[in-house]
Amino acid sequence: MSAVPVQLVSLENRRRISGIVDVLPKEFGLRTFGFECLLNVESADADFFVSTDVSLDGPAIMMNTCGDGSEFSDSGFECVRKFGAFWKRVLVQENNTMSPLVDDVWLEYDLRANPASLSAPGIFYWTHSNEEMDGDIQQRDLLINRISQAYLALTKTNLPTSLLHHLKQCFVVERNDKYSIKSVHIGMMISRKSSGLRLVINFPSPEAILSFLRGAGWPGSICSLSPFVEEWYEMADRVNLNIDISEKGLGMKLGFELSFCNRRSPAREPRWAFLLDYLVRNKMCCPSKMEGLMTYSGYQEYPAIKGIIAESSETKAIKDACRMFLIRKIFHIKVVYDEVPAPVLIAKGYFGVISYFRRGEIYKTAASG
């Protein structure tokens, strides 16, 4: 974490994040982890998130999560174990090719909202449907059933009837509807008082987002929102909509994740500077936070993991194949839109580290030679 600018993550924040990292299974360190910080304030209080997926036996990793020996209550890790057990059951059911899968899971710790303790993390999981079945009503029902199963696994209660109704409204499938939902991240905000869900959905155009909001019953003003959405699509390659669903319906507050397909650093992608400058000009980002994000990206070799083969072999190609790099990236900028009663915009930065191993074909070739 030494490469993270202090204007993005404070020293006290780092101490608390280190406390979480110390008790999470070490396998989490082999995947993506990162930080979320408000950009419109000078304070550097950031939240922390970490992921795992099926390629690293994510269910087993989550089921082994334990708070023993830490300063935190074990109850903060219980929901992680519960979701791991649910995920394992989902994988067992994969023989049904129509069934929506769960590929990766993210844990998000709200450190800013809970500064004195460690509460249960929010759990985000990505589920996608069989591509040949996209737009099919049966496929939609399978996806909603998967969401209901996850809710039951974590809360030990069924989805409230009214919440289930509003969720189904978001997945209404019309014949030849080019805006039908094909894949979605589901967020379960365990640490918050609300019993609702968050959907994170990608749409190909501003018209698609506005059509979805109008059809799903969003209570805000489409006319007020429309100019902002159109502007963001001009600046970014990809826009993901974040929307909360509760028993009362769709929440007024929306989030829009703006990112670029090439995932390059600001040094190689000039549109990052253009986007961040836009946020500064519109009072959504402090100049110091822009500076921190602009200088964050980079990479370094991590010397602690060389691998048994790399340590014992004299073959340079095998040594290289086992090298590990930590790549620092800006993932996306989220612009949060609210009407209270006039439109209000704030921005958040999401940035972090991706682990990368040089192995695969390089190793196979060197080992066979």
Image: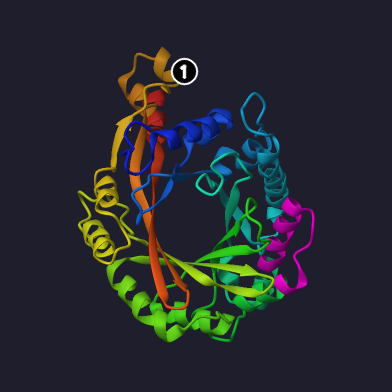
Residue 184 falls in which quadrant of the image? Answer: bottom right
Residue 311 magenta-drawn? no
Residue 133 falls in which quadrant of the image? Answer: bottom right
Q: Magenta segment range?
A: 143-163
The percent coordinates of residue 312 (x first, y second) are: 42, 13
Reply above or below: 7 against 307: below
- Tell me which amino acid carries mark 1: Ile
- Main SS of residues in magenta: helix
**Count of numbered badges drawn on the protein:** 1
The percent coordinates of residue 293 (x first, y second) are: 29, 48
Residue 150 visible (yes or no)? yes
Q: Residues within 10 Å of mark 1 (few under 14, many from 20)?
A: few
The percent coordinates of residue 25 (x first, y second) are: 58, 31
Q: Residue furthest right?
A: 157
Q: Nearer the viewer, residue 283 or 298?
A: 283
Instruction: Name the residue: 32% across, 38% down.
Output: 6
Q: Residue under circle 1? A: 308
